Image (cartoon, helix red, strand yellow):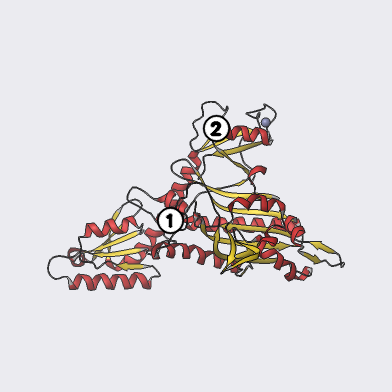
Amino acid sequence: MKGLNIWTAYGWKAMQAIDAHMRVEMAATGHDEVCFPLLVPEDQFKKEADHIKGFMDEVYWVTRAGGNELDVKLLLRPTSETAMYPIFSLWVRSHADLPLKIFQIVNAFRYDTKQTRAFIRVREFHFFESHTCHADFEDAERQIKEDLSIMARLAKRLCLAYRVFKRPEWDKFPGAFYSLAADALMPDGRSLQIGTIHQYKDNFARAYGVRYEDDSGEHRHVHQTTYGMSERLLGAVVGAHGDDSGLVMPPELAPIQVVVVPILAKENKEPVIAEAEKAAAELKAGGLRVHVDQRDIRPGAKYYHWEMRGVPLRVELGPRDMKEGKVVIVRRDSRKKTSVPRVGMVGEARRALDLMAMEMLERSERLLAEGVRDIASLVEEPAMGVLRAAWCGNEPCGREMEDRLGVKMLGTPFEAENGPSGGKCLVCGKDALQRAYLARTY
Ligand SMILES: [Zn+2]
């Protein structure tokens, strides 16, 4: 079905590696994993006005069960605020219950009418969502800082450069006080949102009655945040690192980090296969994820197969290498071949993987840095890469920039920028206190 994709074993392993990393991060930052129902009753969904408005056109409804028309319609979660917050109002009683920090990794559904695209625009998506409740705004702000540091560590594992923008008012999450988004730049010059972090203030708490009793016995609404990501992370990996031969998997993410290919002569295959198995066992003992390709096909066909899947390192081992006590290591990204002593192979492989990860991240950083361009007017600017423009901060001017440049406003940098700021708004000519970032987006 359109937009409802099938995960093959290899892709699912890569996604699970991201999930596993997030579970470690969540445990380290005091978030507990939960699992809420997929179906949300209509009356709960409709409690926060902006939220309904934002999602009404995107939800799938369940209206019948068996032969019966349902009294209360149910919807498939497009996100889980409306499933969770009625329950939060029961869980949170006093300040001792705060902060409440939970997350879940589940499937969610949005009926997106635009053209679907694997990993990037799907209707059933693989959703990481963390939800937190805090005693006050400041503590919720601290949570957002923590989320940003988690995002940074994850992106580093994926060798992905990104920037965090505060989305403009007209593009924030429905019901949020403000929304931050992490955007990566794809080689075709389009921007891809890979994660979002929202400050809700007490907007949802008021709608769902999530309150606590403070020290002095007074009842107060909690302040809430969320942090969301999906398989777009993998889409970004495919887009940012891939080349004409296929995927290039970041070493930390790769389901197989090293493929060992025995180079077999017509006769006397057994000793080479045995040696390849032995080499693979050593690599595994060194903590690497390894596969030996023993198939009876040409080496070239094997190279092609594993290059397409982005396996970071290939170890080639033939009769001549055995005689010389060597193996050949080939990196997927640079195709660089090195002949290394068989005895030092594990260390060489680990070093090659570390170097590859570092260089992949550097390439991604360079692409992003080179992809940002300052513009001084709205005429004849081809919308390639990320455009940076002086902006007064008012919505009509922002929307006009979007329309005239044929781009979306990513927003303003969340963290203070170095370099010249200000200037005059490109639309109205008033003083600009900030620079807006704009790009074509996926
Ligand atoms: Zn303006």
Q: Is the CB of the residue bearing disc 2 within 8 angstroms of ligand 1?
A: no
Q: Quadrant of the N terminus?
A: bottom left
Q: Residue at x 47, y 54 (%)?
A: 3
**Direction from residue 293 to residue 365 in the image, left or right:** right
Nearer the observer, 8 or 371? 8
- Quadrant position of ligand 1: top right
Image coordinates of residue 8 in percent, x first then y, are: 40, 63
Disc 1 marks a residue whose amino acid type is Ala
Q: Is residue 48 above or below residue 170?
A: below
Question: Is the residue under label 2 in contact with that under label 1 (CB below 8 Å)?
Answer: no
Element type at mark 1? helix
Element type at mark 2? helix
Depth-wise, is mark 1 or mark 2 nearer the camera? 2
Q: Quadrant of residue 229?
A: bottom right
Image coordinates of residue 125 in percent, x first then y, are: 52, 58
Q: Is the CB of the residue bearing disc 1 within 8 angstroms of ligand 1?
A: no
Residue position marked by numbered label 2 in the rendering: 405
Count of numbered badges drawn on the protein = 2
- The label number, if any, that marks residue 357 in the structure image: 1
Image coordinates of residue 142 in percent, x first then y, are: 69, 57
Nearer the observer, 225 or 335? 225
Image coordinates of residue 382 in percent, x first then y, are: 49, 31
**Quick check: can you spot residue 45?**
yes
Q: Is residue 377 above or below residue 173?
A: above
In primary-sequence order, the first of circles 1 and 2 is 1
**Direction from residue 347 to residue 407 in the image, left or right:** right
